[in-house]
């Protein structure tokens, strides 16, 4: 079998159906959210990015940026490996405590993404049935630190037995490198800020109302 021929045929079907994805080459401008430059061949064009999950602008917030930069200077860029192998960074523990407090739960568990959580629960709980409406957004199924908080990663919060169970059985946690400590530090700074600040949400709602009031 010629695999490349098969791949190309499948891609051609996507293109003919209008479902093939073309990526825009963007360069976001720090401190000027939501403005960016769009590189088209050899030219750059100024654009406004309205389709970001960073809708509160926390990925550009000076507090978030400062926390990430400080952590990189202090510990470097990576976590080293999975937490089972290379241990847990202090910033992971601080972020977990912040997330547990945010949701009023006992503890939290960090993931690179939450894709393994529901599948692991479904496979381990006897007679478990998981219902998910077709209209659910992916972020409801995989609840991430990219949405609103402006960084990346996933988490769950709940009882200590639940989180310990997922820590011990979820392959997506066990075999995946941990979040970089700098990401954890930035996420914690973002969450701490949004716990007390209402300005970002207010500005977001103003923009939503303004857009909704525009004629079709």
Image (cartoon, rainbow, N blue to C red):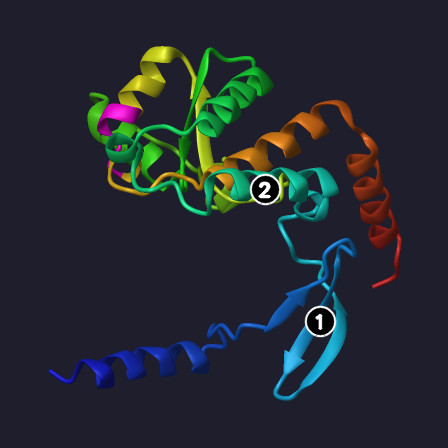
Q: Which residues are magenta?
A: 167-171
Residue 207: image location, x then y, percent: 84, 48
Q: Is residue 111 above or below residue 211?
A: above
Report which residue position mark 1 lands on: 37
Image depth: mark 2 or mark 1 in front? 2
Q: Is residue 168 magenta?
A: yes
Confirm or deny contact between disc 2 and disc 1 (CB under 8 A): no
Horizontal side of 46 relative to 40 (left or right) equals right
Give the crowd class for mark 1: few <14, some 14-19, many >=20 residues within 10 Å: some
Q: Residue at x 50, y 13 (%)?
A: 105
Residue 31: image location, x then y, percent: 77, 53
State the CA–CA distance, disc 2 to disc 1. Answer: 23 Å
The residue closer to the viewer here, 179 or 210, is 179
- Upstream in sequence: badge 2 or badge 1: 1
Report which residue position mark 2 lands on: 68
Q: Main secondary structure of the magenta part?
A: helix
Q: Residue at x 71, y 71 (%)?
A: 37
Give the crowd class for mark 2: few <14, some 14-19, many >=20 residues within 10 Å: many
Mark identifier at residue 214: none
Q: Residue at x 23, y 22 (%)?
A: 125
């Amino acid at each position: 079998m010629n695999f490349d021929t098969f791949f190309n045929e499948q891609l051609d079907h996507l293109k003919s159906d209008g479902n093939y994805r073309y990526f825009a080459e963007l360069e976001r401008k720090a401190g000027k959210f939501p403005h960016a430059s769009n590189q088209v061949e050899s030219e750059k064009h100024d654009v406004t990015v309205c389709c970001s999950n960073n809708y509160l602008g926390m990925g550009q917030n000076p507090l978030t940026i400062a926390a990430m930069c400080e952590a990189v200077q202090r510990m470097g860029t990576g976590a080293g490996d999975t937490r089972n192998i290379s241990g847990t960074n202090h910033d992971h523990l601080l972020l977990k405590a912040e997330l547990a407090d945010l949701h009023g739960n006992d503890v939290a568990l960090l993931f690179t993404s939450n894709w393994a959580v529901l599948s692991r629960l479904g496979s381990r709980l006897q007679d478990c049935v998981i219902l998910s409406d077709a209209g659910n957004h992916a972020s409801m199924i995989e609840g991430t630190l990219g949405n609103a908080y402006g960084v990346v990663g996933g988490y769950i919060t709940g009882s200590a037995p639940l989180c310990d169970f997922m820590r011990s059985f979820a392959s997506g946690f066990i075999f995946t490198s941990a979040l970089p400590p700098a990401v954890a530090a930035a996420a914690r700074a973002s969450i701490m800020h949004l716990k007390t600040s209402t300005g970002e949400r207010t500005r977001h709602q103003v923009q939503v109302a303004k857009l909704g009031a525009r004629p079709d």
